[in-house]
Image (cartoon, helix red, strand yellow):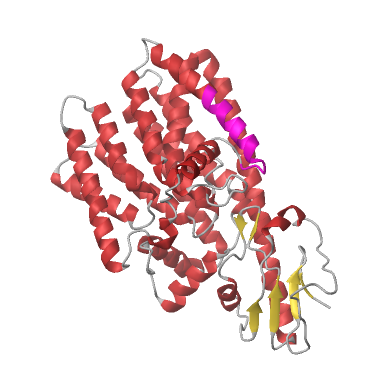
Amino acid sequence: MSKKTNVLVVLLGLSIVVYLPIITKGLASDDFGVMHRIVFGNIFYLDGFFRPLSDISLYVCYLIAGFDGWIYNLFNIVLHGASAYLLYRTCLLLFKENEQAAVISRTAAVFFVLYPFHNESIVWVVGRASNLSCFLGFSALYSALAYRLSVPRMLLIGLLYFASLSTYETTITLPFIAAVFLWQLYPTDKRWIKGLCLFGGVAVLNLLVRSLLVKEIVGEYGARMFDPSVLNNLVKYLKTAGRLFLPPMASASAMTVLAVFVFAVLGGISIRLWKKTSVNRLQLLGISLAVLFSAAIPFLFGVSTRTIEGDRLLYFPSYFLCCWISFVLITWMGKPGYRWINIAIASYFLVFLQINNFTWRKADRITKTILADMAALRPQYKKLLVHRLPEEYKGAHVFRNGFMEALLLNGIDTTGIQIATFMDPMDIHQQDQVFLPEENRPGWVSTPEMPVIYWNNRNMVIFR
């Protein structure tokens, strides 16, 4: 096998190994609603959402293995490894004049496989929308950088990018990144203008199609990006920037302090690197701009700093961030020192990746336990009033949405079942303890005709 083929095999294998703990994880939350809509309703898009390719890929997985979670997880994991390989090939192009190009490229790809703060895109079935969208976008970008922009090639690139935007929206800033990289690689011609027009034209076309088919550009879900408050936006930007490097934590002030420290260190390294005459400043500038452009959507939308929820928004910027980290540190430290710093960063990523995997496994056990308990209780009662249904476990989805669809997909009759309350978010610190409600709990009215059942952090039980 060639060297590049060996890299592909290693990256795919590494992806499977590090995500092996979640390979048998089942569906969660929105997964149930989406799969019910696709399989039984044959509906592949909703008003306000235009992501038909993601739904089609889910349906293909269903045709292979039904609702068994392993096929959906394996698809996401292999796709992630393929994106890492595209990063490796893209870095070889971007840094081809750098004597450390091969090392930078391999390191960036491994960092991307291990990067822990975007794994909702890989672990959550519906989260694959961002995973698949980015793979298509990365493919379009590599094609634009690696080959002459002939008419057939431009048609292929346009199709790939249109498909990317028809799967998820975070790649909307790719036209600016493509223009920057084309300018970096081919500074003496006008290829960057052609690339900007190509990608930009496809983005505009996709928005037009979206507005015609689903009647909205961003919908209510995306409208939250546009906050008129300057202060709120600044706080949102700072939190999101911190989450690019740091795990979620309960203390917002701790996140702020650590984020400032990380930025100070990396900023100092970047400044020193810029001053070195031996450094290709065009390469440093190009990849730095790519990180900023790619982070625009998560900056506008915001990412949770307390849990891992929503970190799928970081999948697109993490691609360029891993490239930036690899380039900056290897170029700055030189050959004697970069091995140890690379090992340290890879270890840091791997530890938090497995912590996140454990969190998703725990959430999956909760989901499966609730469904098993509902299957056992349902034949005993004609009606059930459900209290304290968990929405998530430390950010990993359980039943924020899709509870009724989950019952249906598991052959449980939903007639007479009502959801009264979800778990209070303030109970998150008690999720690993058995919950014992007081006898006269306000709002919990249990009758022989409709008994109350609730989640006690271990099982669904009858409220006496």
Camera-side residue of 148 and 253: 253
Residue 308 in picture, x, y percent from top left: 59, 48
- Name above or below for residue 6 compared with residue 262: below
The quarter of the picture where the C terminus appears is bottom right
Which residue: 45% across, 20% down?
Answer: 270
Q: How many marks?
A: 0
Which residue: 49% across, 18% down?
Answer: 268
User: Quarter of the image holding residue 254?
Assistant: top right
- Name above or below for residue 407 compared with residue 75: below
User: Quarter of the image holding residue 245?
Assistant: top right
Asked whether residue 87 is in view, the answer is yes
The quarter of the picture where the N terminus appears is top left
Residue 311 in picture, x, y percent from top left: 52, 48
Camera-side residue of 216 and 96: 216
User: Quarter of the image holding residue 425?
Assistant: bottom right
Q: Is residue 263 left or right of residue 410?
A: left
Asked if the magenta segment contains residue 449, the reply would be: no
Residue 214 in picture, x, y percent from top left: 32, 67
Q: Is residue 137 left or right of residue 338?
A: left
Asked whether residue 330 is in view, the answer is no
Q: Looking at this view, name the residue that lies furthest to the top.
A: 277
Camera-side residue of 456 and 112: 456
For the magenta stretch, what is the residue range? 248-264
Camera-side residue of 46 and 163: 46
Residue 137 in picture, x, y percent from top left: 34, 47
Which residue: 22% across, 40% down?
Answer: 196
Q: Main secondary structure of the magenta part?
A: helix
